[in-house]
Amino acid sequence: MLFVFTDSLNNLSFKALLPILAVSICLSSHIALPATMQSNIYQTSSKKYSARHWIKNGQSKYNRAKYERAVKAYNKAIASYPNYFEAWDGLGNSLYYMGNYDMAIQAYDKALSINPSSNATRVNKGIALYKKGNYEEALKQYDMALEKDPKLAKIWYNKGVVLLSLSRYNEALQVFEKAIYINPQDDMAWHGKGYILILFERYEEALHLFNKAVQVDPNRGWAWNNVGITLNRLSMYDDALKAFDKAIEINPKSARAWHNKANTLYNLGKYEESMRTYNKAMELDPLLYAGIKK
């Protein structure tokens, strides 16, 4: 899901994207040893050895973003040895990146039934639930993960994003502040808090956070877009233009950055240039003005 700033300037919609939640998908580097307590020790070890081979193959494909092939490899591992945690966990990660959230959740559930202590798997399940729109269920997963490890800033950030989706803004603000307290360099949490401050019309505070965030990571186009929006709301149009130009420099295909730049040009009275910029935004995303895309 994408969080959106909205504004109305001269009857023109004004939008920019806040990032999707930080996905903490991770593959375990631990490979279990062959079983030695079964009645048929050699057969069990052989099956597990075969599964380990396919898991390594799946990890290799996953790391190269070949997710369909990774799924096939993990399924072969599971066929060889059904109770291999890493196979189910890797399968869930690969299915997630293919957009198959239902099956990813099923794979994560199986992985957690084998290893209930895997916090990364629980967080990833929460992310998949979030992507499906099951916000309350996602929140439960994050709370369970935080019970085990309350010092992971990214989990607090993810929880904040879910609370935003539930319009629980004051709670989300507290959660983002918790993430920042744990990791003051977490620029994503700064953006999350800044987004809420925008909703509360605390623009100068939001701008301060966004400026700090782009200092930590100046290569996020959407981050400069957020800076530009805030500057525009403060009527700092020349600075807003610079921020949007930076966003476009990083991602020339961002229709929203072009659109936001067009709005600022309009506010500066540069109507012809503004119209050309609107046309560029429409060329990049014909649905941007159709009320279809959010």
Image: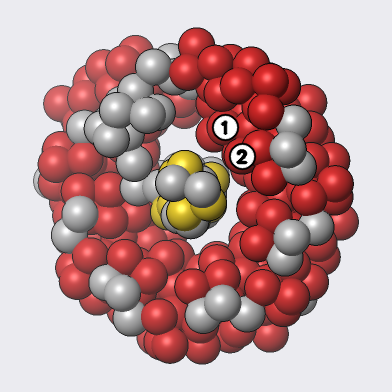
Residue 263 is labelled as: 2
Q: Which residue is mark 1?
A: 259
Q: Amino acid at mark 1?
A: His
Tell me where residue 178 appears, x and y as whole percent.
Answer: 58, 85
Q: Which residue is drawn at the image coordinates 46% and 25% (left, top)?
A: 62
Query: In which quadrant of the rendered view does residue 294 lie?
Result: top left
Query: Total number of numbered labels?
Result: 2
Residue 87 seen in the current view = no
Relative to the observer, which residue lies in front, 36 or 179? Answer: 179
- 84 to 139, vertically: above or below: above
Relative to the observer, which residue lies in front, 238 or 164? Answer: 238
Element under disc 1: helix
- Labels 1 and 2 touching (C-beta < 8 A): yes
Q: Which residue is drawn at the image coordinates 33% and 81% (left, top)?
A: 168
Tell me where residue 71 appears, x and y as whole percent.
Answer: 28, 23
Tell me where residue 218 appears, x and y as whole percent.
Answer: 82, 45
Query: In which quadrant of the rendered view does residue 92 lie?
Result: top left
Residue 59 is labelled as: none
Element under disc 2: helix
Q: Amino acid at mark 2?
A: Asn
Tell me where residue 289 appears, x and y as whole percent.
Answer: 37, 29
Q: Which residue is drawn at the image coordinates 56% and 70% (left, top)?
A: 198
In the image, taking residue 62 as reference, residue 266 lies left or right, namely right
Q: Which residue is drawn at the image coordinates 15% and 38% (left, top)?
A: 103
Local crowd at mark 2 within 10 Å, few (<14), some, or many (≥20)?
many
Q: CA distance from mark 1 to mark 2?
A: 6 Å
